Amino acid sequence: MNNQVSAEPLNYLNHKTGLWSWLTATDHKRIGLLYLYAISTFFLTAAVLGLLMKIEKSSIGPTIMTAQTYNALFTLHGIIMIFIVVIPGLAAVFGNICLPIMIGAKDVAFPKLNLFSFYVYITGACLGLYSQFANGHSPDAGWTFYVPYSAEVNSNIILALLAAFTLGFASILTGLNFIVTIHRMRAPGMTWFRMPLFPWSLYATAWIQLLATPVVGITLLMVVAERTLHVGFFDPKLGGDPVLYQHLFWIYSHPAVYVMILPAMGVVTEIFPTFSQKPVFGYLPIVFSSLAIALVGYFVWGHHMFTSGMSYESRWFFSFITFLVAIPSAIKVFNWLSTMYGGSVDLQPPLLYAISFIFLFTIGGFTGLTLGAVATDIQVHNTDFVVAHFHYIIFGGMGFGFFAAMHYWYPKIYGRMYHIKWAKIAWGFLFTGFNVLYFPMFIMGIQGMPRRYYDYDPKFQLGQTISSVGAVIMFIGLIAMIVNLVYHVRRGAKAPANPWHGVTLEWQIPSPPPHENFDEIPVITREPYVFDNPYTKEK
Amino acid sequence: MSTPEHTEHSEHSEYIDVETGKMGMWLFLFTELFLFGGLFIVYAVMRARYGEDFHHAALELNAFIGATNTVVLLVSSMTVAMSLTAIQKSQKNLAVGLIFCTLLLAGVFMINKYFEYGHKFSLHLYPGSDVMRNLPKGEIMFFGLYFLMTGLHLFHVVVGGILLTIVMLRVKSGKINKEHFLLHENGALYWHLVDLIWIFLFPLLYLIT
Amino acid sequence: MTTMFSGASNLAAGVDRAFIFIFAISFIFTIGIVVAMIYILIRFSRKRNKNPQQFSGNVPLEIIWTVVPLILVLFMFYYGWVAFAPMRKVPKNSMEVKVIGRMWSWSFDYGNGKISPDLVLPLDKNVKLNLFSEDVNHGFFVPAFRVKEDVIPGYKNYMWFQPIAKGSYDIYCTEYCGLAHSSMLAKVVVVDSLEFKTWLADLKVVSNDHPGMAVLKANACITCHSLDGTKVIGPSFKGLFGAKRNVLTDQGEKEVVADADYIKRSILDPNAEVVKGYNKGLMQSYKDVLKAEDIDKIVDYFKKSSEQK
Amino acid sequence: MEDHHDNHVTSYAQNFKILFVLLLLTISTILIIKLDLGPYTVAMALFLASVKTTIVLTYFMHLKGEKLILRLMVGGVFLLFAIIVIITFIDYYFRII
Ligand code: HEA
Ligand code: HEA
Ligand code: CUA
Ligand SMILES: [Cu+2]
């Protein structure tokens, strides 16, 4: 194998070449990259749909599309963003790339299964896209597919449901793989509490993926059965119970929101110590808060149904537990701040994204509390307030977490460096645009602007227009970020093995990593975040 | 749905670490549990709502066939467990024979199901039929659940059967032996799960009338 | 403009108090976090602080920032709860109105034969709304009153409140219900009780429309069917009577003439014969909604309007 | 890697015994339902089913000889499912449909 022409040492990117070697790769890093390219494509597609919706809403009445198109757009936007982008998102991309390295393993426990789940994912994603263009109407039930509408409307709902089902299956397999990997493949000496925090957050996430997804799987199948066979489990015309559908849907989909945010929390937990050159503050509290979020997150699903006519007692119960699940998040936020406190803080792009994560997540989280209190939720349920809440927390949380991860591990993944200044400017646009885009939606929501509305009352004109301007600013930021990252994959300056002076295992191997990560499996002798390596000393 | 393990042969050794493989299988079984769990929740809610109708509808089911199938599955569960004992004791032929018994019993189960479904179909009682559409709502619901639950279970019986056939062939060829029987163990685990689910389906659908 | 603090029902004050409490805490903490963050970024920047301190935890601190937020959220829960609890306890003396939601219009049935497209209510009187849906889920939302409950078919959901200020307020549908979800709007009009009484007692429908036209309007047929030939969701009613139609049935495609019988079938069982080029499942059967004589009125109207041309 | 395998070979006789117990439990389920204990019938039937499940899990599926962590997982998963069912019923139990 030593007849390589290029001067580059062999690594996972070049040890085999050709499209086929990529499509059949079982190397976790390559699978991670496959996911990265797929997910980015889908993200951009759905983001453009979001932009189109905002343009439509920039003025009253039909602007650039019909109501039918708008309804199909937010459905597709929601389905792609939730099921295809953010649920697999961080876990499938950076989990795959970094998890085995960070725990000192050569690969995940079941590499072929890993590749298999990628193809399941692609199948599901294509099915989702296909549902838009297949004969008949694009699906238009929203990403929540509430019955009876979704059981009766004449659009390609079945395809969309099957897509979500398939994607769920991929998600289950990834989760399964990670749990086993973490249990069985840790390097010698790496006890549970010597494991870095990103793997910990993936561990908590994986359990949710594993145990919550099947419930929605069977639920969606039941809706399919309902549409094809006329047995109504949920449709009241056939004797079914529409609220039962909501229960089953949210039994999955609430825990799923923690599938989105936990890995992002894991990412920033890696970033803060590295850029402060200081151990994580409160390792154990962070570990246990991840587990607590995963566990308690199973029991709060009913907060999406406060107005559904659920029993009085349930509303009480779900509201109460919802508030409890906020506590572990609070613990994390405070620990992150304390990690930076007293450190030697270097404001590089990853950290910039990480601190905006804290800011946006805090706003998203607090508005989550507004939604968690029954009385206030009654007012803002299904209004733009909810839309703003989850964009703040998903896009501002998971999305910015993803960007942070991208900027953090980029040199590791490609062995190249992006342009730092450009990265900061792009961040500026993204961050500003983000707030201009979504903040007005909180205010309109409180005033009563309902969501999934194609048209609106003149009193919301100003807010909607400002918000549309925000979307355009974001658009500029995103383009700048993407161009910067894509361009430097090949042309960037060569990156050293450890550009940020990190201490977790992935920084101790070359960039890009060799095919099997480690020539020799490392033996771990101490806690993950001890900053006494030569890099700090030399400063 | 295939089991995770037999797709896996890492580059380093032909056999995968036993504990790893088994844990993977267990996790997979958990997802199956929640898959049927969703159906059980629907069943419970609907039963609470349509107690009377469920009562009437359940009378339509043949408890005898149900009971027979319960016994069939329990015995098959035992034979597959025994085959594992046999392989651990290096009694290859006995192991093959026991798996074969299990497969036979699976066959019996399916034949029973064939008659059971056949009877329903001859009464035009199947999802989408006119007869079924005209039943009281609770009965439609019962039969809908009945067909979905037993149908999904039957699907698992088929998958389990295929899996055990592969296991049997590999035992025969010696690929599964006293040293390496992870796939055998996992196949057995899957088969027991099929049994477990039936343990709940039987009283809920056939008995509680 | 309905701003946040112009609650027009008795329930608004409690809800607003919960809002203010939660927002105040959120605001304080968010500002606190931002200030702390900026301070840290400046004070401990790599330029200023070359030697990071290596501490990694502090138990009392962890306890503080677990317990303090816990107490605060319990208060939030409390405020949210006390404002909500009365919403489900309907006072005995409430006047009842039946709210009917359908794709995509509301109607309000006062029980005395009065059915209105807007909700007219007397000032300072408790009202209980019984929420019914004829097709899919809808949401009944009056922002100014801080009330919202879903209108779900097969469920008997309800809400109550007492309007405390005269005026006209928006009603929105907040549960996605298809194409014209965003135009499923209506108004609550709060008037004083005298005015309300006369309004309620007035059962005649003041309109010069053909009686059939009145039925079409009252049942919101014309949200889907235009009268002027444009294609909305369903086929236009213009020139319907006696026209030839290609319809798809379970047996296949066939041509029919739109006679009285066909029109009746289309209203009672719309999905048995679906007009070519339109979608099945959008129009629901009006079997339980329209009385036989209403349908006759509609047919008569179609006949007359076709004859005019 | 293979050593831990020998320590839980279940004997044929034991397998037989377990089957016997399971069959007994099945018969008692049928009997109990025939007897009709009123409101407790369902509870009893489900209870017996759970007992059977536990037996299958422990012996046929060899949980008895497995590592603690696996047993904890199985227990935890069943518990989680039970809690979810209970929470769902907080809604249905208190609701007047
Ligand atoms: C990544 C995804 C994500 C995350 C993490 C969250 C987190 C939370 N969410 Fe959110 N949510 C969504 C995604 C998410 N949500 C989505 C997609 C929807 C809409 C679905 C739809 O209908 O389409 C939704 C809807 C939604 C609703 C239903 C609204 C409605 O439809 O009426 C509710 C109600 O309770 C809610 C609450 C919460 C709460 C309490 C949290 C908490 O976990 C937040 C905890 C965080 C904090 C509290 C902030 C940080 C803490 C501090 C800074 C410390 C100080 C704290 C205190 C003093 C308390 N969310
Ligand atoms: C990860 C999750 C995620 C993300 C990132 C976004 C991003 C965006 N969303 Fe999304 N949104 C959801 C998840 C997400 N959304 C969900 C789950 C729903 C609920 C759906 C439902 O109701 O069922 C929703 C609903 C939703 C609505 C509500 C619809 C309604 O209720 O009426 C709106 C309206 O404005 C909206 C807008 C946007 C906008 C403007 C963006 C922007 O931030 C996007 C920013 C991007 C751009 C401005 C374009 C950038 C484009 C490029 C860089 C492409 C360049 C490339 C080429 C030209 C090849 N979204
Ligand atoms: Cu009715 Cu939306
Ligand atoms: Cu939630």
Image (cartoon, grey):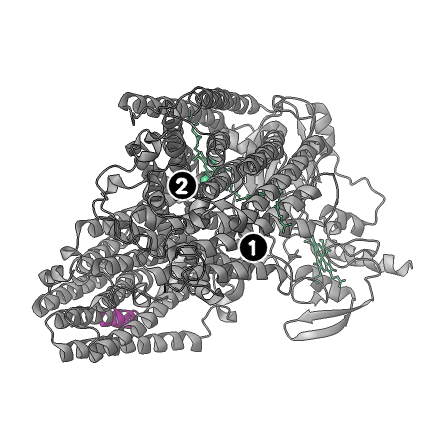
Say which amino acid is labelled 2: Leu
Vertical order, C5 against C242 (above or below): above
Secondary structure mostly taken by the magenta-highlighted segment of the chain:
helix
Query: Is residue C182 within the magenta segment?
Result: no
**Residue A233 can be seen in this image:** no
User: Quadrant where the C terminus of chain C lies?
Assistant: bottom right
For mark 2, what is the residue?
A262
For mark 1, what is the residue?
A150
**Which quadrant of the structure image shows residue C160?**
top right
Q: Which residues are magenta?
A: B63-72
Q: Which mark is residue C4?
A: none
Give the side of residue A460 with respect to residue B194, left or right.
Answer: right
Residue occupying the point 33% across, 21% down: C64
Residue A481 locus on image (x, y percent): 57, 42
Mark 1 lies on a secondary structure that is: helix
**Which quadrant of the structure image shows residue C58?**
top left
Residue B40 locus on image (x, y percent): 36, 55
Discs 2 and 1 lie in a common subunit: yes
To which chain does the residue with label 1 belong? A
To which chain does the residue with label 2 belong? A
Say which amino acid is labelled 1: Ser
- Viewer-nearest residue: A525 or B93: A525
Give the side of residue A103 with respect to residue A156, left or right.
Answer: left
Gap between marks 2 and 1 measured at Cα: 30 Å
Answer with mark 2 or mark 1, whichever residue precedes in sequence.
1
User: Quadrant where the N terminus of chain C lies?
Assistant: top right
Q: Nearer the viewer, mark 2 or mark 1?
A: 2
Q: Residues within 10 Å of mark 2 (few under 14, many from 20)?
A: many
